[in-house]
Amino acid sequence: MPLIAAIPFLVLIALTCGGAVYYGVVLWRVLKTARTLPTTRDGLTMAAPEGGWPRVCVVVPAHNEERVIGELARSLVAQDYPGLRVVFSLDRCTDGTEGVLRGVCADDPRFEIVRVGSCPEGWAGKTNAAWRGVRDSVGARDAELLLFADADTVFEPGLVRASVALLLERRLDLLSLLSRLTSEEWFERWVQPAAGFELVRQYPLDVVNRGVRPRAFANGQFMLFRRGLYDAIGGHERVKDHLLEDIAFARYLDIVRKSMPSRWGVLMTDGMLRCRMYRDWDSFRRGWKRIYTEASLRRPRQLREWARRKRLSGVVLPAAGLVCAAAGPMVMMWDRPLGWTMFGAGVVSVGVFVVTMARIYVDQGLGAAWALTYPVGAWRVAGLLDEAARDLERGVKTLWGGREYAREVKA
């Protein structure tokens, strides 16, 4: 076959080989992370610290969460941590959230409810509720550790104990956990894994947890602070106007690392922490756009770059491998070496992609076969990233926690 006629096939082979290398590196990093980092289940076997367990207070900010908060409350009642205190900080609730909580834990002296009737100017609703939960509660006054959790999470009985053991053993000042997300709705199976994978791509766990120059990241679904650090940085008042307070905390700790040394870690839970982030497609779209917007520091250019990268890595590279594998036998009729090269590269690339994504999907609690849907999810996530960029440029406000927020666009 003449060289000029072979150029399209060579480009296809190059993309296919690029896909094999890309997903091979992803698989290596996933396996490395699993080998070198513990999960919270490893903390279950750790012995109690000398001098006893530190005092822990769980603070849960909540706005109209009557559909989900009962399950969280029951899971906190079942915790085996000695002397645990729990504060539910109800942010301008107009539904039956408080009634659900009283039905679950009214007779348990470890539990407390703080009512937040307003949100001051310049504060996000969630950060204000968390701050009020610490400031206005009895349970948080003498706590040595503060654990902030979202209302849509569910704890296994030993989660608090295992997390505290890991924080102490790893000498961390902040431990955050990645939950296992539910997969009941269509978008939770088809799009959510790709959305989560994009966030982890931006904040790989091996980079977040490394000892030298770790990347600043935390997950607001579960943040366990040493009280001394929380107070020293000013608590939630430090991040009062942020719509992604978890990453804002981590970035601030990174900025003040030299003057205020601290260590943070982010670990997987192996199913010990579950979360249903969104109950319908519309809230899913709005929620993930908010997450990506804040993660990009409100930069439309960055969001569009992520969208292009998502389409290339999640759609183009797997498709190139599939086309190479399928077209290779036909090309053999005209050029056997080229056809065999295409077929071999395609088979390897598709195989590496499937094995890699199957491992990631299984870790998310889905079957390995769902890995084949990843390109569909990647395409939808790229669309969300582009939507987020357009919303920023058009001045579309963010609706979150019963309040609208105008966002400043950054170059």
Image (tube, helix red, strand yellow):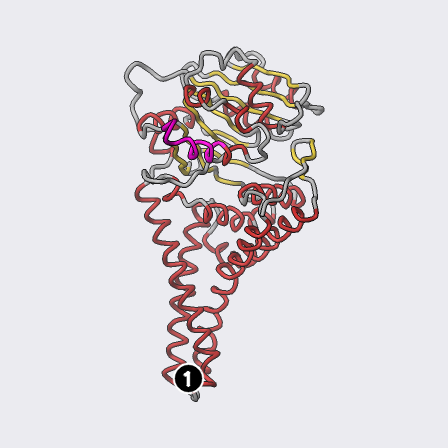
Which residue is labeled 1 in the image? 332
Q: On the image, which quarter does residue 226 sit in?
A: top left
The residue at 49%/35% (across/down) is 219
Residue drawn 51% across the image and 57% down it:
309
Q: Mark 1 packing: few (<14 Cα in 10 Å), some, or many (20+)?
A: some
Q: Nearer the viewer, residue 289 or 271?
A: 289
Magenta residues, start to end: 249-262
Vertical comparison of 141 with 130: above or below: above
Where does the image place residue 204, in percent across and percent down from the top left? 41, 45
The residue under label 1 is which amino acid type?
Met
User: x and y percent of residue 183 in the render?
Assistant: 55, 44
> Label 1's element?
loop
User: Whole-percent x and y of residue 335?
Assistant: 41, 86
Q: Is residue 404 left or right of residue 16?
A: right
Split into 4 quadrants, where in the image is the N terminus?
Answer: bottom left
Describe residue 82's horizontal placement relative to residue 72 as left or right: left
Residue 73 location (% of width, % of height): 55, 23
Question: Residue at position x 37%, y 40% from top?
Answer: 214
Instruction: Tell me if residue 89 is in the magenta stretch.
Output: no
Q: Nearer the viewer, residue 16 or 333?
A: 16
Name the foreground residue: 401 vs 376: 401
Check if residue 254 falls in the magenta segment: yes
188 horizontally vs 251: left or right: right
Q: How many marks?
A: 1
Q: Relative to 15, is 51 above or below? A: above
